[in-house]
Image (cartoon, helix red, strand yellow):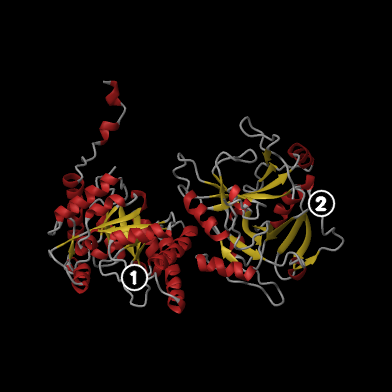
Amino acid sequence: MNLRTIDREAVPEMPNRLGIQGIEFIEYATNRPQALGQVLEAMGFRPVARHRSREVTLYRQGSMNLVVNANPDDARVSATVDGQAEISAVAFRVQDALKAHTRCIDLGAWSVASHAQAMELHIPAIHGPGGTRFYFVDRWQEFSIYDIDFKPIPTVDQHPIAVEGMSYFGLVQYIGAARSADWLSYYEHMFDFSVIPDEERFGILPKGKLMKSPCGQFLWQLIEPDPWMEADETPESLKRVGFGVQDVAQAVQTLKTNGVEFVESKQLHPEDRGALTRSALGSVSFELVHQSVKE
Amino acid sequence: MNLLDGYGMDTITMAGPLEAKLEAMKNVGFSQVMLMARDLVGHPGGVKAAVKAVQNSGLRPTGFQVLRDFEGLSGHLHAYKVDIAKAMLEMCAATGSKVLLACSSTSRHATEDLDLIAKDLKKLAMMAIPLGIKVAYEGLSWGRTVNEFTSSWDVVCRADCPNLGIGIDSFHIFAAKTSLDAIEDIDPDRIFLAQLSDFMWHETPSFEERMTTARTFRVFPGEGVHSDQLADLVLRLERIGYRGDYSFEVFNDDYQQLPLETVAERARKSATWLHQDVLHRSAPLPSWTSSPQRFAV
């Protein structure tokens, strides 16, 4: 009789072949960085540093780093329409950035050419949905990558605390019609994300398919257009960021005093499970999601 | 709803500039077109102008062809083919085509290991996902390892990727004399393209004969000696639930020197034969039948 504990329960070992350990930063592209900055500040982010060679600003609150890219030479910035800001990249913390990048390229990812200037960090990246990128960062424990490419803004607290302890909870990706299977397969294969059963949902916007990162630190939601939206040919994109927070009501109240407006309709309104901010600058909204256990 | 909506011609069938081909197809009532990379690259105005011509025609691209000898290579050969595949995928996406046709390898340098072939095709499919493209893998009847739809389906199953399916080409099935019974084993949702053509020879035993016939002397469905088989194939595809497009993959040296409208007219006749005589679908009802007045009587 075999009494090895491993056989007693079916505990699947989640593979994490890139060694993903959460999100290092999220990048927005916009040609109106000040306007986006105001939106971010209302959400509790503070500008803490500026890029040495490009028009790029680092915002931060708590554990969350957020980069605003307004570099006019970047095609992703010039492609933004009417000053609408878009999520242009997500950087994953990984065990070994070069290995992660090489593995993804071997599996069929498209590499992004680096534009790092002298003495700047070359952060390997692959193309994501639409015009977005996925970066791989491995030096997040021994030192801060921002110390190399960014100069701190003088007199500013480099580590502002987060509103009600908010942290990155996940991203929402809008995908084309009948494209869920493709993207589920892509993220499973590339990043070892795993599918969360349809019965299990978080927050107040449960639509589409939900995946979990192999480190368990963030979620990835894929949303197709509704069948009646036949003409919806909008390009695939990373639509919004979700913040995890223990006390949604308290966070909503704090953010409201900052001037953040929330969607408050009959169907969708702030409740204990979550809340959605009203779209700012035509495209930028954030989701709050109740998260009971904090890392 | 147009009678010809589910059928389309390939640009390879006709001679002349892209715009003239598109116009000839449109004029006889087709609403889709299977594009060839050469149409874009060989356009006097370049790829951008060719893409514009396709958009202006209003014809929907059935798919984009053709990526050759991609799978089973290693080292620098593999790296080279990945670059070629990327360029093909980018052109495919630029035209708005949702399907890239990839033919099974004929290369002596390629492995015969089906799992390695599947691995490479999975990589190709992954490359295609961010661009919103499906890959239709077709077994050439002179392919080195994969030369029947049964083996291309086997490889697709091994790769197990939702945007990787098979392309069916009637020519290769008849040339290789593959039994049509195996159609029933295929998931209809994973047939991303069905290319139809007939030919004039009863037998094509050698790879050389298959190649020459395939490249110079195919004819439209219903024009050759395999019409009954072709009808059988289409009916079987219908029976398993295939509802995708039928594209006429007709390489024919004679058609290359006929006026485009003559060739397009032959294609139209062929589509009508398939639609009415084979599939027994009725011609669309006149528009007044769908007006609300008929209920008021």
Label 1 is placed on what type of residue? Ser
Residue that carries the numbered disc 2 in the rendered image:
A161
Residue extending farthest top: B297
Residue extending farthest right: A155
Which of the pair B209/A151 is nearer the observer?
Answer: B209
- Chain for disc number 2: A
* Residue A96 showing in the rendered view: yes
Which of the pair B136/A7 is nearer the observer?
Answer: A7
Label 2 is placed on what type of residue? Ile
Position of A11 with respect to B93 (left or right) is right
- Chain for disc number 1: B
Residue plotted at (45% across, 47% down): A178
Residue plotted at (65% across, 55% down): A215
Q: Position of residue B47 (x, y in %)?
A: 40, 68
Q: CA distance from mark 1 to mark 2?
A: 58 Å
Residue that carries the numbered disc 1 in the rendered image:
B105
Q: Position of residue A15 (x, y in %)?
A: 59, 58
Rendered position, B277 above or below B157:
above
Q: Position of residue B38 (x, y in %)?
A: 33, 69
Residue plotted at (18% across, 51% down): B231
Determine the secondary structure under disc 2. loop
Rendered position, B136 above or below A234:
below
